[in-house]
Image (spheres, coloured by chain):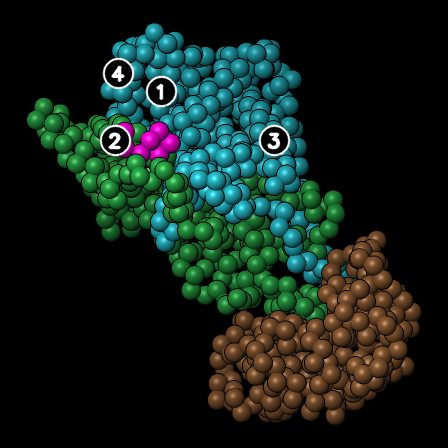
């Protein structure tokens, strides 16, 4: 189920402005990779380029190569819509569909695409996805209530369940805990731990303890100067990155000395 | 929007504080006092009139406040109080015609407003007879406005979708600009447009409900576009992204996420647009005619009466009974418009999904 | 207004386009283009249908005051008197409505208790909900008779000003009455635009003024009015556009006539829109075509005023 991502020479632009310059990396399957770096260093932009979500921003484009196992997702015949079905995404702010119940939110991917599904198949998918997101016990009695009635942490787990219900092989998470309290954050981190058995997980985070806690590998992004594009500075095993990074820049950032 | 309180804290100036200020409830007390004194004086001279009374009360209040404030609080405070009184006055002044219109229409309209009036047409009724009603005009208003809505809503909402979700560059700019311009088209010009169009298509003298509906649609489309555009922009970007991230194509995202999320707002906007055009008169006089007296459900054949045109044509006849009918029809029309107005607000408030 | 940033998305630059996407985007785009076509069609059809009478016209259309168009040959008609009446009525409305509208907007944004503010704004909006034919009925059936005594007072004390020379019309159905009704009708537009800009005044500007020890009025004069100038001007012009084209209220209050008179208290003036509504049912010969020509003039005037208004508002937004 989980797949490997191979990026080589990826540049991302907003109009004429280059936001991310020449990134190459390999993201291992069945592991958690964390992207860290200061605000505006291009890590979220890069993340969005991994499932072509950047294309929904007007003027944004990318060139380079992103291989999902053997498939180049930027290939000429590749449909970005299919790419996003294969590489799911969870956002900073929990965003359940306000017009749908919890149940409908979970199967939204299938529903919105008008896929035929029997009632029992749908029931099974909802239960499986909610269990997978550690949310089943909390909501099983109110599946027909609107998703917006849940707490922030529950909503975020609902969004994770919704993303996994379309059976992606990769899950991209863009600062999924930044709007949550510590207890909800812990719940999500536990979930990430559990889910790496089945998925390739990439998480952008501002919280270095979180990167250290949840990830196997860490990539550090930085700007060479304000107004310049963001770059991948270095990438490695999380343990090693946080104890003895190769680059001085990385050490400065991790130990809190900037610049 | 203003996050400060509307009552900004009075600046604490050092020495001025000791000069004292007018007591807290000085304003309402003075207002009540001047109102009753003026009323007393006017009654004593037995020349009481509401307008005169309000005017004199305002003048008395203004003069006393400004002099007292200038004495006790200083010139700056006096000026501030003067402006405050003027600003309150402006609002009350604007309410005067609203109250007056609603009051005169209700009082004059009630004389003839009845179940009979609503349920019969003017077929076979001579203008000066003490009979007849607006049923045919209600039918015409419903048919014409209904058809105008059917034309305007798809065009208006789709254009709003285009502007919000797709358009870029010059086409977007020019559509936005010309929709704005279109909101300013005088209604009589919209009527003349259809007259000109009909003359070219069918030759002169073809009055019918469909042409009236097209004229109304010209007036209604820009209103629907503007309100729908606003509502679609309120749908958070995150919802669209959530849908895209599930591998849902854009058109399904729009039809299944964006439009349902803004459905309540769209409905509100459409109902307000209907409320706006349902009272239009000038284009209907030119296109559907002003002399139909009988019930006509056929939009494509023959003149069609409508409530606003009924009011106008009765006024043009000029007799006392005609004026009675006009007032009663005006009451009917205002009730319809107000109903649409309040329903629209209720729908907007009750059915809007929470998107935080 | 139109400058808020849109959560929009560009079409995918590469990859297959889905049939559903192509069809739906095409539908949306054609609707937008259809609107441009309708507007162009309005201008085109009016010109085409106005042409026969304009080319047969034996008088100068723009400078002639008479209206002798209901004939089969040699019509002689012009819009001079009507254009004068139109601009005069709209100007009266603007002069009366603008200060009041600014006052209302200030009241709602800065003076009214916050809990009531939206309700009060809603009441002002109700003024816009009343159909113009009802305003016309109110004007002729209630306001005009009430104004007769006011007009008498005006001519008695201000009669030395040519605008208010007597004797006033005994019916009260004059251009001034029409102007008052139009003023009521355009109040909500000007108020709404002014409210919008007043809401946009940065809190920092207002607090800076208050922190200097300014009274509320001084704060408004220093921070709010300069900032809101373009919005107020734009709103007033939009109101003017509405007043220029308003038909029913004017047609019901003023009687058919073709005079040019500066006297506001006597009947005689007529507006383009009112003239069209009153003449259309009786038009024969070149009559309809001539009325369409008059409508074309009205269309052009309101188009220019509205475009200028939008330009002023857009420029103000950019500066803000």
Q: Nearer the viewer, residue B163 or C33?
A: B163
Residue at label 2? Answer: B68
Q: Are marks 3 and 2 on the same chain?
A: no
Instruction: Name the element at disc 4.
Output: helix
Residue at label 1? Answer: C174
Q: Nearer the viewer, mark 3 or mark 2?
A: 2
Image coordinates of residue B249 in percent, x first then y, are 71, 69
Return the mark for residue A16.
none
Q: Nearer the viewer, residue C8 or A49?
A: A49
Return the mark for residue C308.
3
Image position of B252 with respect to B47: above or below: below
Image position of B150 with respect to B259: above or below: above
Question: How busy is the neighbourhood of tag 1: few (under 14 within 10 Å), some, or many (20 plus)?
Answer: many
Q: Main secondary structure of the magenta part?
A: helix
Give the Cα separation between the discs numbered 4 and 3: 38 Å
Chain C's colour? Answer: cyan
Query: Which segment did they paint magenta?
Result: B71-79
Q: In the picture provided, is A200 more to the left or to the right than B202?
A: right
Give the Cα separation between the discs numbered 4 and 2: 32 Å
Which chain letter matches label 3?
Answer: C
Give the Cα separation between the discs numbered 1 and 4: 15 Å
């Amino acid at each position: 189920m989980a797949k490997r991502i191979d990026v080589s020479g990826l540049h991302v632009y907003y109009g004429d402005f280059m936001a991310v310059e020449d990134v190459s990396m390999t993201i291992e399957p069945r592991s958690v990779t964390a992207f860290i770096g200061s605000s505006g260093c291009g890590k979220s932009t890069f993340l969005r380029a991994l499932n072509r979500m950047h294309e929904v921003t007007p003027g944004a484009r990318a060139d380079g190569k992103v291989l999902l196992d053997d498939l180049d997702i930027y290939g000429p015949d590749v449909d970005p819509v299919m790419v996003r079905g294969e590489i799911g995404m969870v956002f900073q702010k929990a965003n359940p569909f306000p017009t749908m119940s919890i149940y409908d939110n979970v199967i939204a991917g299938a529903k919105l695409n008008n896929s035929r599904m029997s009632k029992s198949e749908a029931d099974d998918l909802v239960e499986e996805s909610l269990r997978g997101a550690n949310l089943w016990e909390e909501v099983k009695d109110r599946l027909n209530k609107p998703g917006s009635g849940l707490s922030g942490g529950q909503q975020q787990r609902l969004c994770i369940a919704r993303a996994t219900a379309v059976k992606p092989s990769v899950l991209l998470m863009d600062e999924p805990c930044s709007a949550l309290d510590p207890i909800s954050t812990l719940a999500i981190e536990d979930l990430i731990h559990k889910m790496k058995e089945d998925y390739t997980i990439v998480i952008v985070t501002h919280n270095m303890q979180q990167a250290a806690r949840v990830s196997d590998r860490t990539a550090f992004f930085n700007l060479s100067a304000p107004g310049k594009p963001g770059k991948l500075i270095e990438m490695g095993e999380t343990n090693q990155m946080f104890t003895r990074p190769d680059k001085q820049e990385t050490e400065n950032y991790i130990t809190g000395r900037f610049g | 929007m203003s996050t400060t309180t509307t009552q900004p804290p009075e600046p604490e100036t050092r020495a001025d504080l000791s000069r004292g200020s007018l007591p807290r409830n000085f304003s309402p007390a003075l207002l009540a006092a001047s109102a009753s004194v003026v009323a007393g004086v006017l009654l004593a001279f037995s020349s009481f009139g509401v307008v005169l009374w309000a005017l004199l009360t305002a003048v008395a209040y203004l003069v006393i406040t400004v002099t007292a404030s200038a004495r006790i609080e200083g010139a700056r405070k006096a000026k501030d109080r003067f402006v405050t009184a003027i600003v309150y006055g402006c609002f009350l002044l604007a309410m005067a015609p609203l109250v007056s219109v609603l009051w005169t229409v209700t009082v004059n309209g009630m004389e003839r407003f009845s179940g009979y009036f609503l349920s019969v047409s003017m077929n076979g009724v001579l203008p000066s007879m003490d009979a007849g009603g607006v049923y045919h005009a209600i039918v015409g208003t419903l048919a014409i406005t209904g058809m105008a809505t059917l034309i305007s809503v798809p065009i208006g909402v789709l254009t709003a979708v285009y502007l919000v979700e797709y358009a870029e560059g010059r086409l977007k700019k020019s559509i936005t600009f010309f929709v704005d311009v279109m909101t300013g088209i005088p209604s009589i010009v919209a009527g003349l447009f259809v007259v000109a169009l009909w003359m070219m298509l069918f030759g002169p003298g073809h009055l019918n409900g469909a042409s009236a509906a097209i004229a109304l649609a010209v007036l209604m489309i820009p209103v629907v576009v503007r309100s729908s555009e606003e509502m679609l922009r309120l749908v958070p970007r995150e919802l669209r992204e959530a849908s895209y991230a599930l591998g849902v194509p854009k058109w399904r995202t729009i039809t299944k996420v964006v439009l349902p999320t803004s459905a309540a707002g769209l409905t509100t906007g459409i109902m307000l647009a209907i409320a706006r055009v349902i009272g239009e008169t000038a284009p209907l006089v030119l296109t559907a005619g002003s002399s139909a007296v009988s019930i006509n459900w056929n939009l494509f054949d023959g003149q069609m009466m409508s409530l606003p045109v009924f009011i106008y044509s009765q006024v043009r006849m000029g007799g006392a009974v005609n004026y009675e009918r006009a007032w009663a029809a005006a009451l009917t029309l205002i009730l319809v418009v107000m109903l649409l107005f309040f329903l629209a607000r209720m729908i907007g408030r009750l059915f809007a999904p929470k998107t935080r | 207004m139109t400058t808020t940033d849109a959560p929009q998305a560009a079409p995918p630059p590469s990859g297959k386009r889905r049939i559903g996407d192509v069809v739906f985007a095409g539908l949306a785009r054609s609707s937008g283009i259809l609107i441009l076509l309708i507007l162009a069609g309005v201008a085109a059809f009016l010109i085409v249908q106005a042409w026969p009478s304009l080319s047969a016209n034996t008088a100068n259309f723009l400078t002639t005051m008479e209206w002798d168009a209901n004939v089969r040959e040699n019509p002689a008609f012009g819009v001079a008197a009507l254009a004068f009446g139109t601009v005069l009525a709209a100007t009266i409305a603007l002069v009366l409505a603008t200060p009041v509208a600014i006052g209302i907007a200030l009241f709602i944004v800065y003076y009214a208790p916050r809990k009531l503010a939206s309700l009060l704004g809603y009441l002002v909006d109700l003024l816009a909900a009343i159909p113009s034919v009802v305003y016309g009925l109110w004007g002729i059936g209630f306001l005009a008779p009430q104004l007769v005594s006011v007009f008498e007072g005006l001519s008695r004390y201000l009669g030395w000003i040519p605008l208010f020379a007597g004797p006033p019309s005994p019916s009260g159905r004059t251009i001034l009455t029409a102007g008052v009704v139009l003023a009521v009708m355009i109040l909500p537009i000007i108020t709404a635009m002014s409210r919008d800009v007043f809401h946009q005044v940065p809190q920092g500007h207002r607090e800076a003024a208050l922190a200097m020890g300014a009274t509320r009025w001084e704060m408004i004069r220093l921070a709010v009015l300069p900032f809101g100038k373009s919005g107020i001007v734009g709103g007033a012009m939009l109101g003017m556009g509405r007043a220029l084209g308003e038909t029913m209220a004017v047609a019901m209050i003023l009687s058919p006539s073709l005079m040019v008179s500066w006297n506001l208290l006597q009947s005689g003036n007529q507006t383009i829109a009112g003239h069209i509504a009153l003449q259309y049912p009786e038009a024969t010969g070149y009559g309809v075509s001539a009325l369409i020509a008059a409508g074309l003039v009205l269309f052009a005037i309101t188009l220019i005023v509205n475009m200028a208004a939008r330009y002023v508002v857009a420029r103000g937004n950019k500066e803000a």
